[in-house]
Image (cartoon, helix red, strand yellow):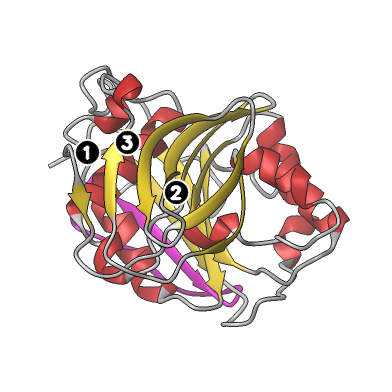
Amino acid sequence: MKVRNWILGVATVGAVIATGVGMLKAQAGGAATPAAGSPRAIKALLITGGCCHDYATQKAILSEGIGKMAKIEWTLVQEGGTGKDFINPRFNDPDWAKPYDVVIHDSCFADVKDADYIRKILKPHFEGKAAVVLHCAMHTFRDSPNANEYREFLGVTTHEHETATMLEIKPVLAQAKNPILAGFPDVWKTPVNDEAYIILKQWPNTVPLATVYGKMNNVDFTCAWTSIYGKGRVFGTTLGHATEVVKDDTYIQLVGRGLLWSVDKLGADGKAVAGYEARK
């Protein structure tokens, strides 16, 4: 698994982690060089930063953990410090998402309200670029004038969360055979306190996969789902505030399978399809 790690928009270290696919030779923005006769690695951009979370640790946990599930070349981008109103200049490039097969949005910039800026982020996904949206991505741009355009992309509408507590997550019975839920327990109890996001609306193309019991509201909220946005597939989960939750294997497996589904590389058995397995 090849990892390019960027922080604050400045290249720091291009690290190769000795799990997953091993070393794949590639230039920034270029195509990876696969082994002869095998498909190239899935190219994933994980873009993170902002308020309230240990993103430096979490981005490493996610890329390393999911990299053990499939052949992935990661580009990790952490920008915007710990504020809530960062405008990322990379999205001014209309081809910002072009080098990648999937973009993982794992940021927390709740105070950004620039509608044109948000549309620059949404455009490649509407045109077919796969996406994974995690936790505070659902509260990013929440007060922007075109917040509902963004929420249609996410697949859910939420503006706040309950007080963090130990959570119980259950799979949706109707989705019991969905390969994203392969191996998911009947009840998953978070190892530490995490946040139940208050879901106000599910958009028409959203398919709930799992629910979390909201103790303050006495209701089950969707907490993992798939959606279709334009031509693009989107997997999302509101879980993952606490780093101990992010590092839990149940969480890694859920997000990893969601990522594989988003790029249509998830088999019926819940594993990467042939040719995309992680190399030992």
Q: Pointer 2: what residue?
A: 26
Q: Is residue 155 above or below residue 143?
A: above
Q: Start and end of the magenta stretch?
A: 1-20
Task: Report the residue at 45% width, 53% height from top.
Answer: 238
Q: CA distance from mark 1 to mark 2?
A: 18 Å
Could you give the CA–CA distance between mark 3 and mark 2, rounded to whole angstroms? 25 Å
Q: Is residue 52 above or below residue 76?
A: below
Q: Majority secondary structure of the magenta segment?
A: strand
Q: Nearer the viewer, residue 34 or 255?
A: 255
* Residue located farthest toward the left when viewing the structure as drawn: 280
- Residue 246 image position (x, y, % from top left): 30, 61
Q: Which amino acid, mark 1?
A: Ala
Q: Are marks 1 and 2 in contact (CB under 8 Å)?
A: no
Neighbours of disc 3 within 10 Å: few (<14), some (14-19), many (20+)? many
Residue 103 magenta-drawn?
Answer: no
| Residue 13 located within the stretch drawn in magenta | yes
Q: Secondary structure at mark 2?
A: loop
Mark carried by residue 81: none
In the rendered structure, which disc, 3 or 2, sits on the residue that comes first in sequence? 2
- Closest to the observer: 230 or 29? 230
Q: Nearer the viewer, mark 3 or mark 2?
A: 3
Q: Secondary structure at mark 1?
A: loop
* Numbered mark located on residue 278 in the image: 1
Q: In the shown orientation, is residue 176 left or right of residue 216? A: left
Residue 227 coordinates in the image, percent (x, y) = 55, 30
Q: Label 3, on which residue?
A: 257
| Left or right: where 170 falls relative to 226 | left
User: At x 33% / y 30%, what residue is drawn?
Assistant: 172
Q: Position of residue 29 (x, y in %)?
A: 57, 49
Q: Position of residue 245 (x, y in %)?
A: 27, 63
Nearest to N terminus: mark 1 or mark 2: 2
